[in-house]
Image (cartoon, grey):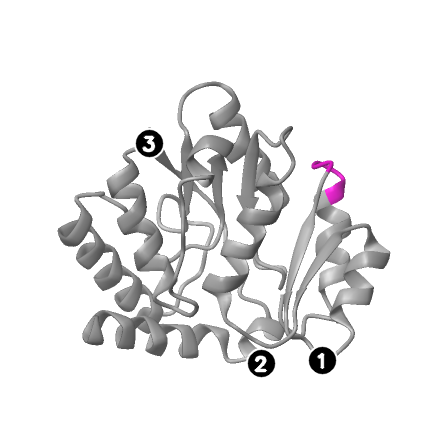
């Protein structure tokens, strides 16, 4: 989370209705987000400065794996764009033995309303990822993911910002776990749009693809 004080408390409380453990990686917030997340029931690990989403994900994986009882890990955005029901269904597919990694895709059903620009950029990113790794993903930049502990332990993200998504897919292609995509809904709220998430992320993804 990075400056998500207005929403993170609700996100944590909703998650705790289905999951026993919620960890928030605070990436240098200055708006009181860590205290709100703790009050809602999350464990909080704080970066003293803003490092980026890739760094936050790697910190979260490392922290969760310190508990030897960890069996699955879900990555879940702090801004309220993901659904807890989707996360629960993804974990169930791992627990059933169907897969070791479940990757969310907003393009496997029609629940997510995506702007034409963002749809184009994400399609290009998925195509490039398929060419580079052989993984036939429909949505290579979706933040909702589930891993079993053994696979998560082999992930080592070194790209702190938008390039981490491509790095993660590349590492999964090398690890070669059993994986599936799962239909998920992304909720683009007025809050997330006000932060520039939709257009800015599209620009960042294109920049990553052009200069890698």
Q: Which is nearer the N-term, disc 2 or disc 3?
A: 3
At 86% from the left and 58% from the top, the residue drawn is 39
The residue that label 1 is drawn on is 30
- Whole-Å distance between the Cαs marked 2 and 1? 18 Å
Q: What element carries label 2?
A: helix
Residue furthest right as drawn: 39
Asked if residue 18 is among those painted magenta in the image, a careful observer would answer yes
Q: In this view, does 94 lie to the left or right of 7?
A: left
- Whole-Å distance between the Cαs marked 3 and 1? 38 Å
Q: How many marks?
A: 3
Q: Quadrant of residue 27?
A: bottom right
> Picture coordinates of residue 157 (x, y %)?
40, 56
The residue that label 3 is drawn on is 177
Region rendered in magenta: 16-20
Q: Comparing marks 2 and 1, which lies closer to the viewer?
A: 1
Asked if residue 41 is among those painted magenta in the image, a careful observer would answer no
Asked if one can make out residue 156 in the rendered structure from this viewpoint, the answer is yes
At 72% from the left and 65% from the top, the residue drawn is 7
Chief secondary structure of the magenta portion? loop
In the displayed structure, 198 sits above or below 88; it is below
Badge 1, how many Cα within 10 Å: few under 14, some, many 20+? some
Where does the C terminus fall, quadrant-wise? bottom left
Badge 2, how many Cα within 10 Å: few under 14, some, many 20+? few
At 55% from the left and 43% from the top, the residue drawn is 74
Badge 3, how many Cα within 10 Å: few under 14, some, many 20+? some
> Picture coordinates of residue 96 (x, y %)?
49, 19
- Whole-Å distance between the Cαs marked 2 and 3? 37 Å
Where does the N terminus fall, quadrant-wise? bottom right
């Amino acid at each position: 989370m990075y400056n998500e004080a207005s929403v993170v408390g609700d996100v944590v409380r909703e998650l705790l209705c289905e999951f026993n453990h919620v960890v928030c990686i605070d990436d240098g917030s200055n708006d009181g987000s860590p205290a709100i997340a703790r009050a809602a029931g999350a464990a909080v690990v704080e970066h003293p400065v803003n490092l980026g989403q890739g760094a936050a994900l790697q910190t979260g994986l490392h922290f969760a794996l310190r508990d030897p009882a960890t069996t699955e890990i879900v990555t879940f955005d702090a801004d309220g764009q993901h659904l807890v029901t989707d996360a629960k269904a993804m974990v169930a597919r791992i627990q059933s033995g169907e897969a070791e990694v479940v990757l969310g895709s907003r393009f496997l059903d029609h629940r997510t309303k995506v702007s034409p620009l963002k749809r184009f950029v994400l399609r290009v990113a998925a195509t490039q990822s398929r060419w580079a790794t052989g993984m036939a993903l429909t949505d290579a930049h979706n933040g909702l993911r589930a891993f079993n502990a053994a696979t998560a332990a082999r992930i080592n993200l070194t790209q702190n910002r938008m390039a981490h998504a491509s790095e993660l897919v590349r590492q999964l292609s090398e690890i070669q776990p059993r994986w599936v995509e799962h239909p998920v809904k992304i909720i683009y709220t007025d809050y997330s749009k006000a932060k520039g998430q939709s257009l800015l992320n599209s620009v960042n993804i294109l920049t990553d693809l052009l200069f890698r």
